[in-house]
Image: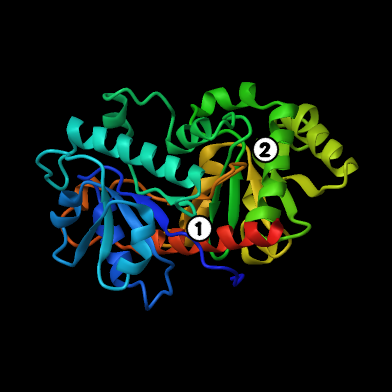
């Protein structure tokens, strides 16, 4: 990790208060010294933390109070009350506080009061009931930062693999029509710049998966590789990018193959997320590239079924906090 000037603390909106977000945030604070975590503060209703944890919570009224408080308790910036919180039982009030916490955290990061945001999981079904209109937190954060969803890239990153889905939350049947040369180019360019800016890789190596089995077998199994994917890659390579493909996806993710690239660009959601969750389920991180702020998140959901049972693994949240700090420091070095 790049050492530099002290950073502002990181804002961690607690996500849905009935999910495992409060538990994994609290457990991350408990492990702060063992895992070398930078100071952070929770954003939301402290009652959500108290519902699952008996550790010390320190109320703060501004982010700058968090660093001094961090050694003795989990700093929490209360923004509103969510009403009665029952772990495992999501509610409209809980969704509303999750929405507000996310909004506040983004604003703090944009103002520089927070070094970045690390978002805990939210329940999209519940959010849609309180006016949330975006496919996910990634698109919401991008909009609030003035970045189009087209230019904000969701990367899933773990110790052994980084992947970017070209298309994200759409039906598999809609993927072929959604793929365009321009979309692939935009995702690849943002990814390459994001690898430089957030990971300090001066010349990132990109590998691009095909859409069809065996990357289409020269048109025998589909023409998307010939008409869309390969032309995009050739254009990017001609512009100086270190990029290869389209490659057969079934041979891209074994250990020897992963040594040949820094990030894999995949054509659809599960093509990217199955390998990353297989390899790095407990420490996979969602990092949004193309934003003016640092934003990471654990690569898992609310897990309402185990909320309140003290069984949630904080590994991905810890990894997300660590990656947020590394990205913030890399951005300082990048200039």
Q: Position of residue 196 (x, y in %)?
A: 71, 55
**Residue at point 49% right, 32% down?**
144
Secondary structure state at the residue bearing disc 1? helix
Q: What's the mark number on residue 46?
A: none
Q: Is residue 109 left or right of residue 225?
A: left
Spot the residue most to the right. 238
Q: Quadrant for residue 331, please give it.
A: bottom right
Residue under numbered circle 1:
324
Secondary structure state at the residue bearing disc 2? helix
**Residue at point 79% right, 27% down?**
227
Viewer-nearest residue: 118 or 186: 118
Which quadrant is the N terminus positioned in?
bottom right
Q: Are there few (<14), some (14-19), or many (20+) residues within 10 Å of tag 1?
A: many
Viewer-nearest residue: 304 or 248: 304
Q: Is residue 235 left or right of residue 133?
A: right
**Residue at point 47% right, 59% down?**
8
Q: Is residue 223 visible?
A: no
Marks 1 and 2, how far apart in space? Answer: 21 Å
Q: What's the mark number on residue 187?
A: 2
Spot the residue most to the bottom. 34
Which quadrant is the C terminus positioned in?
bottom right
Q: Is residue 17 above or below residue 253?
A: above
Q: Are marks 1 and 2 in contact (CB under 8 Å)?
A: no
Q: Position of residue 67 (x, y in %)?
A: 37, 65
Q: Earlier in the sequence, mark 1 or mark 2?
A: 2
Q: Position of residue 19 (x, y in %)?
A: 24, 47
Q: Quadrant for residue 288, please give it.
A: top right
**Residue at point 59% right, 72% down?**
3
Q: Is residue 274 left or right of residue 181?
A: left
Viewer-nearest residue: 38 or 304: 38
Q: Position of residue 13 (x, y in %)?
A: 34, 47
Q: Nearer the viewer, mark 1 or mark 2?
A: 1
């Amino acid at each position: 990790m790049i050492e530099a000037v002290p950073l502002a603390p990181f804002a961690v909106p607690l996500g849905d208060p009935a999910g495992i977000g409060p538990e994994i945030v609290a457990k991350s604070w408990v492990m702060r010294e063992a895992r070398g975590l930078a100071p952070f503060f929770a954003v939301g209703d402290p009652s959500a933390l108290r519902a699952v944890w008996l550790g010390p919570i320190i109320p703060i009224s501004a982010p700058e109070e968090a660093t001094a408080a961090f050694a003795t308790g989990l700093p929490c910036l209360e923004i509103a009350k969510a009403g009665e919180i029952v772990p495992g039982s999501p509610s409209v009030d809980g969704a509303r506080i999750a929405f507000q916490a996310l909004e506040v955290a983004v604003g703090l990061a944009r103002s520089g009061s927070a070094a970045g945001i690390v978002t805990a999981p939210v329940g999209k079904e519940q959010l849609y009931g309180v006016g949330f209109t975006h496919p996910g937190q990634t698109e919401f954060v991008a909009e609030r930062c003035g970045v189009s969803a087209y230019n904000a890239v969701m990367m899933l990153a773990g110790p052994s693999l980084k992947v970017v889905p070209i298309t994200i939350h759409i039906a598999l049947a809609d993927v072929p029509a959604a793929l365009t040369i321009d979309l692939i180019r935009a995702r690849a360019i943002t990814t390459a710049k994001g690898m430089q800016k957030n990971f300090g890789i001066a010349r990132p190596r990109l590998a691009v998966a095909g859409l069809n089995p065996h990357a289409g077998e020269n048109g025998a199994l589909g023409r998307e590789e010939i008409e869309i994917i390969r032309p995009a890659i050739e254009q990017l390579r001609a512009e100086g990018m270190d990029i290869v493909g389209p490659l057969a996806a079934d041979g891209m993710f074994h250990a020897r193959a992963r040594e040949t690239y820094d990030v894999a660009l995949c054509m659809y959601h599960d093509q990217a997320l199955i390998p990353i969750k297989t390899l790095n389920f407990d420490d996979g991180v969602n990092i949004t590239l193309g934003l003016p702020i640092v934003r990471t998140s654990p690569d898992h959901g609310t897990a309402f079924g185990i909320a309140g049972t003290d069984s949630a693994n904080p590994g991905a949240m810890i990894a997300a906090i660590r990656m947020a700090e590394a990205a913030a420091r890399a951005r300082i070095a990048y200039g």
